[in-house]
Amino acid sequence: DTEVTQTPKHLVMGMTNKKSLKCEQHMGHRAMYWYKQKAKKPPELMFVYSYEKLSINESVPSRFSPECPNSSLLNLHLHALQPEDSALYLCASSQYGSTDTQYFGPGTRLTVL
Amino acid sequence: GESVGLHLPTLSVQEGDNSIINCAYSNSASDYFIWYKQESGKGPQFIIDIRSNMDKRQGQRVTVLLNKTVKHLSLQIAATQPGDSAVYFCAGAFSGGYNKLIFGAGTRLAVHP
């Protein structure tokens, strides 16, 4: 089973809202990732968690706050987003690091009004 | 710097023909390359990967070739089918302490009956 699940599938929020994106995997992977993807562009790395600790933050604005409660779960907390943050947010996991196959979830389509 | 790029943004093929999607990379210290297929509204789906100690790897109807001399890799799809229509991304993982995958810009494959 190589499934990564993400909820919700779609999210519409205002600029003053607080919301969270959730990601889950049960493959025993120890690395988890958040990516942002704009239309017709490749995924852009935002955060990497390795063994439940944040190992990479690609200079992401603080209005995005990641959290890894345990080895199977990854959250992305959103607060005071801007319309330009509207995108597909993808979660991925790999066994240990980036030189292991990263498996992606279906993504959350976020629209910020 | 690190970069992974594709030669063509769009590739149109007839059903049943073979498809070749090309990708170039700049960092000779790369360890690992991977091809993803992304259909509209979905997350990237793993197709095939290859490590830098290999020149060729085959899967079901797909072959990845790696030429380290000219820093080039390609994805060959045999007997292309309408279901192969998607955007294809190559990605590379580079050594040097970075735990991340660098994506190319993507090639849209359109299969015509």
Image (spheres, coloured by chain):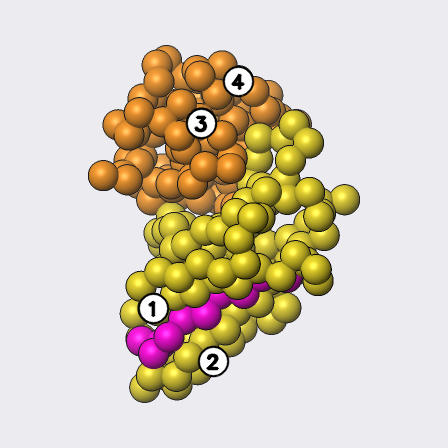
Chain colours: A orange, B yellow
B47 vs B7: above or below: above
Q: State yes or no: discs 2 and 4 in contact (Cβ < 8 Å).
A: no
Please state which of the two labelled residues, at mark 1 or mark 4, is closer to the viewer: 1
Q: What secondary structure is found at the residue carrying circle 1?
A: loop
Which marked residue is nearer to the observer: mark 2 or mark 3? 3
Q: Chain of mark 2?
A: B
The three-letter amino acid code for the residue at tag 3 is: Tyr
Disc 2 to disc 4, how far (Cα)? 41 Å
Which residue is the site of mark 4?
A: A54
Give the secondary structure at mark 2.
strand
Magenta residues (range): B72-81
Q: Could you classify mark 4 by the number of other residues whose Cα lies within 10 Å: few (under 14), some (14-19), or many (20 or more)?
A: some
Pointer 2: what residue?
B12
Q: Subunit of mark 3? A: A
Which residue is pictured at 53% across the width and 63% down the height? B65
Q: What amino acid is labelled 1 in the image? A: Arg
Q: Are marks 2 and 1 on the same chain?
A: yes
Which residue was labeled with disc 3? Answer: A96
Mark 2–mark 1 CB contact (< 8 Å): no
Distance from the alpha carbon under mark 3 to that under mark 1: 28 Å
The structure residue drawn at horizontal position 48% and vertical position 65%, both measured from the top left corner, is B75
